[in-house]
Image (spheres, rainbow, N blue to C red):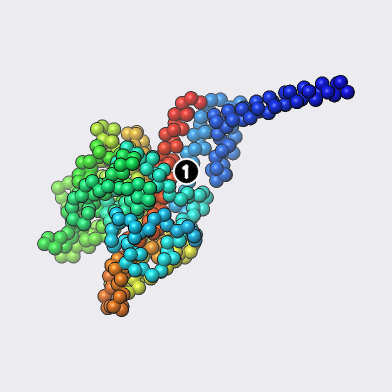
């Protein structure tokens, strides 16, 4: 019995210490080597090579970097029903353009508000406005481009305003084409610059020619001149390239798009779009690293329209639900414009990296194509059918209702910024491996 009591006493005395030591070692291991905490969707994509305790420091660094550089592919997925609905109420958001306020204008069907984008291989978290403001505190974000840039900006403002009030601090130009807000809570500024071609352009007017003039080798200085005040840029172009235009390169006419009556060669707009994007990215990259603040550039890809029949007739975009998988394919002009945009960003990435510039595509073309139900349609104006259906009814089947599918663009953009922030932190960690 004495021997058994001695064993029991020994076990009772040292077992708690063994337990506490094991816990301490486990915490130490997880803190400094959190490799096994990677979400399952990422683990499934890892290479077959495993990291073993005998691996050298350099090989561990390479494998860790390989794990964390695997991005989530938000491009492919499907729209699924979501009972939670939008983050904000359009009638309570004071910053959005009246033409996108579909609820206030009397749109009767609200089913379009209850869908969320579900990527095939990973999870897209719900937008967290506080996290966005924290990540961009003390910075200036600028949306540059056409009315889709403004549409995306106003979506973001509405979501951020649920936790902090934006103050309008600058306004210039017709139709609020140049504006800036400031969030005092995080010393964060957000601006919009009207630049429908990104490069220098003279827009058609009632008193002038009925076509646009584009100068493809000169960037639009209305926004580029402010690069020393901007930390992050979101670019958005496409729809204005469909309009009649005469193109200039250097001091000569390059050609034109849909210009009957003018003695110019018809060349379409695809190559011109390519040249305009190349000039834009080249200029930003060239100026980065000098006295320019900008470090991050995001290009939002083309957003397809959904007109069915005449734009000025009732029922121009009548859908009330998203397309199902395989019901609508990305093809034709929508695919071509999107491909040119992705192509130019990919070509510019290496030069951007050498200048310390992060460059990324926000590929929203396919997920936007799947949402024919998300446009204002006739509700770009208040109560369009108050007096019955008229012969002519203007429809907006290009822009997006707010709240609406375009909120997802900013949801994905937050994840891009989060990944950038995580990579920056891990780069510091790599140095100590």
Helix, strand or loop at disc 1? loop
Horizontal side, residue 147 vs residue 306: left or right: left
Tell me the residue that label 1 is attached to: 71
x 68%, y 28%: residue: 19
Residue 315 as seen in the image, left or right of residue 79: left
Q: Nearer the viewer, residue 206 or 252?
A: 206
Whether residue 62 sits left or right of residue 156 in the image: it is: right
Q: Is residue 224 above or below residue 146?
A: above
In the image shown, does 322 or 386 lie closer to the viewer? 386
Q: Point out residue 112 in the picture as x, y percentages from the top left corner.
A: 42, 64
- Closest to the observer: 27 or 198? 27
- Residue extending farthest left: 207
| Image location (x, y in percent) of residue 273 | 28, 52
How many labels sit on residues?
Answer: 1
The quadrant holding residue 401 is bottom left
Give me the residue at 41% from left, 39% from top.
420
Q: Residues within 10 Å of mark 1 (few under 14, many from 20)?
A: few
Q: Nearer the viewer, residue 240 or 126?
A: 126
Q: What residue is rendered at 47% in x and 50% in y?
A: 124
The x and y percentages for residue 352 are 33, 37
Residue 347 position within the rendered picture, expressed as x and y whole percent measured from the top left = 35, 43
> Which residue is at a point 30% across and 55% down the rendered structure image?
94
Q: Is residue 147 above or below residue 286?
A: below
Q: Is residue 225 above or below residue 81?
A: above
């Amino acid at each position: 019995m004495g021997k058994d009591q001695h064993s029991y006493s020994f076990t009772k005395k040292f077992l708690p210490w063994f337990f506490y030591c094991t816990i301490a070692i486990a915490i130490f291991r997880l803190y400094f080597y959190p490799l096994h905490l990677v979400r399952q969707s990422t683990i499934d994509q890892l290479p077959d090579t495993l990291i073993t305790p005998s691996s050298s420091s350099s090989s561990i660094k390479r494998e860790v970097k390989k794990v964390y550089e695997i991005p989530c592919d938000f491009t492919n997925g499907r729209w699924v029903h979501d009972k939670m609905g939008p983050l904000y109420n359009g009638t309570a958001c004071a910053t959005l353009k009246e033409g996108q306020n579909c609820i206030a204008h009397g749109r009767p069907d609200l089913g379009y508000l209850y869908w969320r984008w579900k990527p095939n291989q990973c999870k897209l978290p719900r937008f967290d406005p506080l996290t966005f403001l924290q990540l961009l505190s003390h910075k200036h974000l600028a949306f540059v481009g056409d009315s889709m840039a403004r549409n995306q900006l106003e979506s973001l403002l509405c979501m951020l305003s649920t936790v902090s009030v934006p103050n309008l601090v600058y306004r210039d130009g017709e139709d609020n084409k140049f504006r800036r807000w400031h969030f005092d809570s995080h010393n964060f500024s957000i601006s919009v610059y009207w630049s429908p071609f990104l490069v220098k352009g003279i827009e058609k007017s009632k008193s002038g020619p009925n076509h646009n003039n584009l100068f493809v080798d000169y960037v639009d200085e209305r926004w580029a001149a402010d690069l020393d005040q901007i930390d992050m840029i979101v670019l958005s172009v496409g729809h204005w390239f469909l309009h009649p235009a005469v193109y200039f390169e250097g001091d000569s006419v390059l050609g034109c798009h849909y210009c009957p009556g003018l003695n110019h060669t018809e060349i379409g707009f695809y190559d011109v779009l390519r040249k305009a994007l190349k000039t834009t990215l080249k200029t930003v990259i060239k100026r980065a690293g000098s006295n320019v603040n900008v470090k991050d550039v995001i290009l939002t890809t083309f957003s397809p329209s959904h007109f069915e029949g005449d734009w000025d007739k009732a029922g121009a975009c009548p859908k009330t639900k998203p397309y199902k998988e395989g019901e609508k394919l990305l093809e034709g002009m929508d695919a071509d414009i999107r491909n040119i945009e992705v192509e130019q960003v990919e070509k510019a990435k290496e030069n951007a990296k050498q200048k310390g510039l992060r460059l990324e595509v926000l590929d929203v073309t396919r997920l936007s194509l799947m949402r024919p139900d998300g446009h204002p349609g006739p509700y770009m104006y208040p109560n369009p059918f108050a007096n019955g259906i008229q012969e002519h009814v203007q429809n907006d089947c290009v822009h997006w209702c707010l709240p609406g599918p375009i909120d997802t663009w900013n949801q994905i953009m937050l994840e891009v910024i989060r990944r950038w922030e995580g990579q920056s932190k891990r780069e510091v960690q790599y140095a100590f491996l």
